[in-house]
Each structure stands twice: as C-alpha cells, then as structure tokens.
Amino acid sequence: MLVVLIVVITLIIIAGILLILWPKLVSLRERKLFARIVGRKVYSLAEDKDFYVINQVALSIENKIIHFDHILFTNKFIYCIGTKYYDAPVSGNYEDAQWLKYNSSSNIERIKNPMLLATARLNYIKSSVNAMDGIFVSVILVNDTCILDEIKNCPPGNYIMNLNEFRKFVEVNEKSDIPDIDQLCLEDLVQKIYKKTIKNEEKNK
C-alpha cells in the first residue's frame, strides 16, 4: 500500500512538472523546426513559380561575412530572407535599436530590432553587385503564432511578416506594373551572388 502511494505521488509530481514545462517544451520544438518549415515553404514557392532560390547563404563581401537564410530570385525582385522565431507578441519602430516582446502583461523583454541588421546586410549585397535600385527586398519571416503589433515606419523594400503571408506577398508583387528584371541581368546577378558564397570561393582557391 505504501509503495502504491509513493508511485501515485511520484506520478502526480512528474505530471505537475510536465504541465509547467510543457509550453516551454512546445516552444523549443517549434523554434527548432521553424527554420526547416520556412525552407520548405520558400522552396515550394520557387518550384511552383519557376523561381530560383539559394539557401543558407554566407557571402564574403568587403571582408565581412553576410548571412541570409534564403535568397529568392523572382521575375521582378530579389528577396533576401531572414527568419526569426518569437514566442510572444513583438512591437517597435523600424528606427529603434530595440523592440519590445510581451512575454506577459508583467514581463516585457527588450530585444534587438531584427530589421536594422537585415537592412545593413541588404545594403552590403546591393553595393557589391551594382544592381539597379529597387530590385532587392529585405524580408524577415516570423512564425505564424507571433503577433506583430504595430511595427511602424518601415521604409520601402523592408518588410517583416508572418510566414503564412509570404507567398501572397510575392504573388501580389509579381502581378504589379513594375517591369520584369531583364533576364540576362537577372542571370548575371544570380551568378555574381552565387560566386560570392564562401563555399564557392573556397572551391576556387
């Protein structure tokens, strides 16, 4: 009888611990899988629309290593894509060094503004390939469970959005009146960027 009581108490304690930790375990799993989910979505879009995509990009530019999770080449734009996972709503202005993450009503965390770094990286790649203005677009994709609350003053060509919005965003842009990138120019840009990837530079040494 005592053994049964000990087992029951132990199970209750374990269940209580799991109940407390479960949201964090779910969040950790989603965070780990999110980059893979984004990769599949971007690849699927590229395959369906006959676009070109480079994944896990590390470019050597001006003695700096510039990272992008994906670079998607469409008919009208080149999307330099980064991914971020947030387990709570975030808000902020484009110009602010820090944004706010609302873990709870009593717990507000300051986080780095992801758009400023993305813009800096975008500027490096634009200057390195001498592309015409307006072709490159910076996009940060965040998990669909994250609420982006009042992200203000984003300049043209700089976006942050939930993953489920990205395909529609690209499709709308492709239907706009903006002229297509010249095919030879686009192929040249693909080659220029591809040749700047670190792996390819190492192969050429």
Image (cartoon, rainbow, N blue to C red):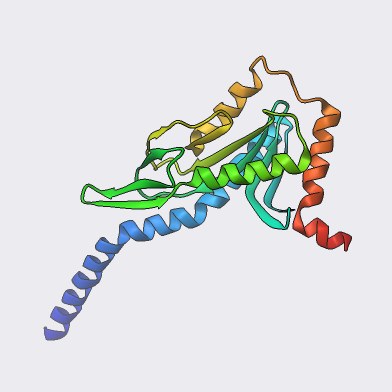
x and y percentages locating residue 110 in the rendered image: 35, 52
How many marks are shown on the rendered structure? Answer: 0
Give residue 90's quadrant in the image: top left
- In the rendered structure, the answer to whether residue 105 lies left or right of residue 164 reads left
Give residue 18's quadrant in the image: bottom left
Residue for point 72% across, 41% down: 127
**As rendered, which of 66 and 72 lies closer to the eye?**
66
- In the rendered structure, the answer to whether residue 1 lies left or right of residue 154 reads left
Q: Residue furthest right?
A: 204
x and y percentages locating residue 179 in the rendered image: 73, 18
1 is higher (above) or lower (below) than 153: below
**As rendered, which of 66 and 20 lies closer to the eye?**
66
131 is higher (above) or lower (below) than 111: above
Residue for point 25% across, 68% down: 17
Quadrant that contains the N terminus: bottom left
Q: Residue furthest left?
A: 1
43 is higher (above) or lower (below) than 49: below
Quadrant that contains the C terminus: bottom right
**As rendered, which of 26 and 132 lies closer to the eye?**
132
Q: Residue furthest bottom?
A: 2
Give residue 6's quadrant in the image: bottom left
x and y percentages locating residue 33 in the rendered image: 51, 54
x and y percentages locating residue 85 in the rendered image: 46, 49
Residue for point 67% across, 28% down: 134
- In the rendered structure, the answer to whether residue 110 lies left or right of residue 35 reads left
Residue for point 64% across, 17% down: 176
**As rendered, which of 113 and 85 lies closer to the eye?**
113
